[in-house]
Image (cartoon, helix red, strand yellow):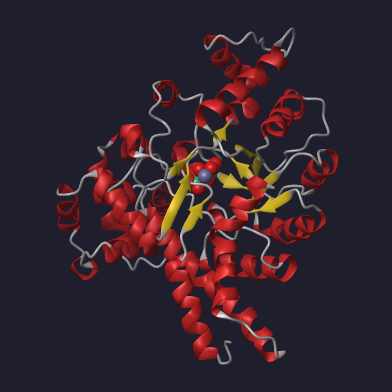
Amino acid sequence: MITNPEQLGQIINDELNQVEITDVHTHLFSANFGSMLLWGIDEVLTYHYLIAEFFRYSRLDYGEFFSLPKTEQADLVWQTLFLDRSPVSEAQRGALTILNRLGLDVKSRDLDEYREYYRSRTIEQQIDTVFDLAGIKEVVMTNDPFDPQEREIWKSGAGNQDPRFKAALRIDPLLMDYENSYKVLQGEGYEVDAHLGGNSLQEIRRFIRDWVLRMDALYLAVSLPPDFNLSQDSTRTRITEECVLPVCRELDIPFAPMIGVNRLVNKRLGFAGDSLGKADVRVIEYLCTNYPENKFLVTMLSRENQHELAITARKYGNLMVFGCWWFLNNPTIVREITSIRMETLGLSFIPQHSDARVLEHLIYKWEHSKSIIGQVLEAKYTDLLATGWGLTRESVSQDVQALFSTNFENFLRS
Ligand code: RAT
Ligand code: ZN
């Protein structure tokens, strides 16, 4: 039985160090995807979170920056964000956590030395090292059948060869850009037209089904703008209600709407130019009420949506809330959101995903998040001890595993 705070802190730390994480949403790929898997210091430094921060200080022409070779972009970011000033933002700190945990000398500030480390590494070794350092068991990829390069990899059978990398079928073009994306379906032999006439809906269902099965996808995901709703009779509404939801039901996989992105607010910044807005949580109520046989994995991007999303999850067993997504993945906000969720949902949520785009991101995203989630949990346990409640190492272990892996696995199976 755990009786005092020191013992409690030690046990939580042990459990956090041991837990094997399932990372439910990343942009990583297995080594079989070749150049699609990003890794290495130059990729870390040119992460779009850091590019946005670079342009807070630089007036360089955007086009000029993006036309430079990656190493030169990384040199500029390193100079501007790490040498010219202290790297205090979360993404800056993240790059330093990575270097430090890989055993590199952060004090030296010597980018060439960091590059040198990578010259002796193979991607296979680096995956093992990073998974080990970050405590990862499995990551879920973001798999796009509208990307010709990726499509070919799946068709060749190489997509599922590393069991540590699970698939998630991502269908943004289908819901966000049907006027163009239907042509991809046509090119792949599906009988669809621009207006959802004829056999289009049936064929879109066949397309989704074929890709879920080919990838063995754990869920079907889409990122959506803040004004997402299903109250208008639009192409998006029809594809969602008549194709996406029926196929998810049939194959018993969750639908994962990720809501709140305003894409390309500043187009010239490319990937780094996306922003966010507050969404209407009633669309989640609508989905969970009208489709009780479907399961919904939901994350929202605006801080303002977080309390109402947690309350919504109290109303529906078919709703699983996950992650502190993207602009929310800052220590202050992770602490706040995790506290709100724990106080309203107990342990029945998935506190975090990494959204890693570069392999090494797993190291910092998980170290930083684990520490805060652990502190929130510790505060709650301390309150429990004050009531006279008894905790054991086993109960702590079970709770930590729920948060970092089994809630997801059980939701998939439910
Ligand atoms: O966090 C990110 O890297 C974003 O660019 C997006 O990828 C977002 O997470 C998404 O999946 O749309
Ligand atoms: Zn993402």
Question: Which image quarter holds the N terminus?
Answer: bottom right
Q: Is residue 167 above or below residue 322?
A: above
The residue depicted at 69 percent of the width and 28 percent of the height is 247
Nearest the eye: 116 or 122: 122
Q: Is residue 134 left or right of residue 120?
A: right
Query: In the rendered picture of this protein, how many numbered marks are placed on residues?
Result: 0
Q: Is residue 359 left or right of residue 253?
A: left
Q: Is residue 84 visible to us here?
A: no
Q: Quadrant of residue 321?
A: bottom right
List x then y, in percent, for residue 220: 61, 36
The residue depicted at 46 percent of the width and 40 percent of the height is 271
Q: Is residue 13 visible to us here?
A: yes
Q: Is residue 171 left or right of residue 289?
A: left
Q: Is residue 146 above or below residue 99?
A: above
List x then y, in percent, for residue 119: 15, 48
Q: Is residue 170 above or below residue 125?
A: above
The residue depicted at 67 percent of the width and 9 percent of the height is 193
List x then y, in percent, for residue 382: 62, 85
Nearest the eye: 275 or 382: 382
